[in-house]
Amino acid sequence: MSLQIKLMQIEPILAALRRHKAGTILIILQIALTLAIVCNALFIIEQRIARISRPSGVIESDLLAVENSWVGANNESMVALNRTDLTALRQLPGVRDATLSNSFPLRVGGRVTGVRIDPSAKKEIAQTAEYFTDDHALATMGAKLLAGRNFRADEVTTSDSKSYVSSPQVIITRELAERLYPDGSALGKPIYLVKDGAPSAVIGIVERLQVPWPGAWTDAFADYVVLVPVQLTDERNVYLLRAQPGQLQAISKTVPQLLFRTNRMRVIPDQRGIRSFAEVRADAYKSDIGIAAFMGVISVILLTVTAAGIVGLTSFWVGQRRKQIGVRRALGATKHDILSYFLTENLLIGAAGVVIGALLAIGLNQWMMSEFEMQRLSLLYVLAGMAVLLLLGQGAVLAPAMRASRVSPVEATRLN
């Protein structure tokens, strides 16, 4: 019986909506646009948060990075200069270990190359970041060795980046090992970082190390890293220091003083020259955090404006229909009937809006996929957005609908 009454209400509701086409269409379009934008915005926020939350694979709380550039030094002299610096840094009170590298996780700068297991293959299996470092790298970064062994000191060589070809030994991350040799352990197996070049034997596998770049273009190989036992004699390099617990702030002040006492013919940039890993992470994900915050604000504004639009339109309609409401009350309609009428009317408007909005959301996502390499929007976001917009609409219309249900039959019928 209740369902029959509700179905009987739909025809007069549709007739009323046809008499107010402009307002009805505006609210439907507003709901549709809000759903399309908010679904994609929340999807983008979820992607950014997932990217920001990626583990780097290093001991972040105790790691310090020092960007160093030599002035007037040649390749031969830089070997001795780097060695002197590392000896001094490792002996500094509060320093647990130190290493030299061309890059590190989230540095936003480094070297990427293709990796193969067949040297004659035309296409690499995957892309990977290369960290040129030494036998102190794992201890300094805190990378967990899952299988195999670390580099020995006698395996570490020196080279400038232009002359480097390959190394007999490498250590790789577990993700890369599973990609290259999915049917068995990569330990002891050859990999080729240069097409038709010499093989590099995998002597160790670490649990995780992230590539230096935080952008979306690295999503496919975010944990594909190769450690190479080569200290590059380039003009620019990075010293990584692992502090003793609680000593990070202290050594961040003493390290530059020590380095300049060791040799003043260097440049340590004022900006980003000396950074804790917390600062490295903040710098790397600054744009992601900004975009997520902006999308969140836009979503809140759109939802608020949509709710306000529904409240305003329903209040306007209630004011216009006070006499009709009074007549219905005089003919026996209860407060619940009046309330149900406006809730049903708004539900029909909302349903039309979310259906159109779902199509717009999918279309907008398809466009962003082709233009900005976005991932495909999950239908769960669309379904959840539809439910939220419908609930928001019902909640927004509740107050004016309740005011309509309290209209007195006598008071309404006396209106001119």
Image (spheres, rainbow, N blue to C red):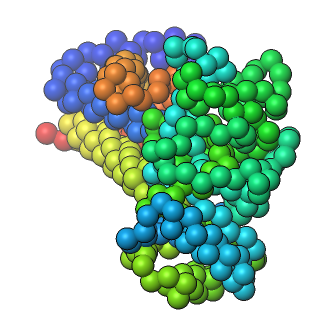
Task: Please name the residue shown 61% across and 75% down the image.
Answer: 84
Task: Please name the residue shown 22% across and 25% down the image.
Answer: 25
On the image, the x and y values in percent for residue 109 come to 45, 51
Q: Is residue 81 left or right of residue 392?
A: right
Q: Quarter-wise, where is residue 369 in the image?
A: top left
Taking the view exactly as shown, the residue that stands out farthest to the front is 76
Above/below status of 13 relative to 67: above
On the image, the x and y values in percent for residue 68 come to 47, 69
* Quarter that holds the C terminus: top left
Task: Please name the residue shown 67% across and 49% down the image.
Answer: 229
Q: Is residue 345 visible?
A: no
Q: Nearer the viewer, residue 239 or 195?
A: 195
Taking the view exactly as shown, the residue that stands out farthest to the left is 416
Q: Is residue 29 visible?
A: yes
Above/below status of 353 relative to 8: below
Task: Please name the residue shown 50% across and 73% down the image.
Answer: 274
Q: Nearer the viewer, residue 176 or 190?
A: 190
Q: Which of 150 and 407 is in front in this view?
A: 150
Q: Is residue 413 left or right of residue 40?
A: left
Q: In this view, does 216 lie to the left or right of 408?
A: right
* Quarter that holds the N terminus: top right
On the image, the x and y values in percent for residue 408 come to 35, 43
Q: How many labels does the image show?
A: 0
Q: Quarter-wise, where is residue 314 in the image?
A: top left
